[in-house]
Image (cartoon, rainbow, N blue to C red):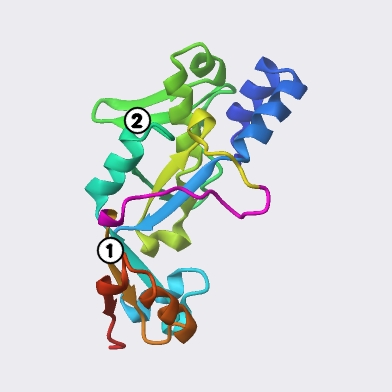
């Protein structure tokens, strides 16, 4: 998760190893919902995994509806919903100052540094911000994805089904504006989409040009 020595040092000195492992195990169940901020052109699909050659669909969501769903939900309430992804040459290595301090944020007045013990003694929400910071950093080679993420963790995590590769979260049909179908999308998938009453009237087709 990180190659930043100040962060490693902070955890090693503050936690017993068993507590660190317990925290990391819990963190492994964190849910990440990934979104791109604009509809990709067919020629740009290759920047997304398994989407090259026009074999893809893209769901266009109503952002305000999604935020309302996640922020107001009694099942998984949260604070800020969408988080911008930071693209960096070395995303797992954060700038540090000395042995303990790492870069927390940049402001118009300069750089602010934090330490792991300092975060842990602060408000719990501040440590949540730290986790989100780690989970919204990607390599520069993915910059064209123009990604934003919803991070679900802690008490916000729905019951985990070990047979599923993620979490099933219900959203209102009104949060889906359109479903964009690319030229080489699987025909069987398209037929299934046409059979879903809430979205069959929202199918749009992306031109190959």
Image coords of residue 122 (percent x, y):
46, 13
Identify the residue at horizontal 32%, vertical 51% (top origin).
Answer: 172
Give the mark nearest the N terminus, 2 or 1.
1
Q: Main secondary structure of the magenta part?
A: loop
| Disc 1: CA contacts within 10 A as few (<14), some (14-19) or many (>=20) | few
Image coords of residue 196 (percent x, y):
38, 69
Image coords of residue 63 (percent x, y):
26, 50
Label of residue 139 in the image:
none
The residue wearing badge 1 is: 38
* Mark count: 2
Q: Quadrant of residue 146?
A: bottom left
Identify the residue at horizontal 49%, vertical 47% (top origin).
Answer: 32
Label of residue 79 in the image:
2
Q: Quadrant of residue 9?
A: top right
Q: What range of the chain is rendered magenta?
A: 162-174
Gap between marks 2 and 1 measured at Cα: 24 Å
Q: Are marks 2 and 1 in contact (CB under 8 Å)?
A: no
Q: Let me know if residue 165 is in the magenta part.
A: yes
Is residue 113 in sight in this rendering? yes
Determine whether, in the image, residue 25 is placed left or right of residue 48: right
Identify the residue at horizontal 62%, vertical 31% (top origin).
Answer: 5
Identify the residue at horizontal 26%, vertical 77% (top origin).
Answer: 204
Local secondary structure at mark 1 = loop
Local secondary structure at mark 2 = loop
Determine whether, in the image, residue 42 is placed left or right of residue 122: left
Q: Residue furthest top?
A: 121
Front of the two marks 2 and 1? 2
């Amino acid at each position: 998760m990180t190659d930043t020595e100040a962060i490693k040092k902070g955890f090693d000195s503050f936690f017993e190893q068993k507590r660190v492992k317990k925290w990391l195990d819990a963190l492994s169940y964190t849910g990440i919902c990934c979104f791109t901020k604009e509809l990709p052109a067919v020629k740009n699909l290759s920047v997304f995994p398994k989407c090259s050659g026009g074999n893809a669909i893209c769901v266009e969501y109503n952002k305000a509806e999604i935020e309302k769903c996640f922020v107001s939900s009694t099942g998984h309430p949260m604070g800020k919903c969408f988080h911008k992804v930071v693209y960096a040459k070395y995303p797992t290595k954060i700038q540090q100052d000395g042995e303990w301090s790492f870069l927390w944020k940049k402001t118009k007045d300069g750089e602010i540094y934090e330490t792991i013990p300092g975060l842990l003694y602060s408000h719990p929400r501040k440590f949540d911000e730290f986790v989100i910071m780690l989970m919204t950093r990607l390599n520069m080679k993915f910059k064209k994805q123009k990604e934003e993420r919803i991070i679900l963790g802690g008490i916000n995590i729905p019951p985990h089904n070990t047979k599923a590769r993620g979490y099933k979260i219900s959203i209102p049909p009104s949060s889906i504006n359109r479903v964009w179908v690319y030229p080489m999308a699987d025909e069987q998938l398209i037929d299934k989409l046409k059979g879903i009453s809430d979205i069959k009237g929202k199918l749009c087709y992306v031109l190959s040009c």
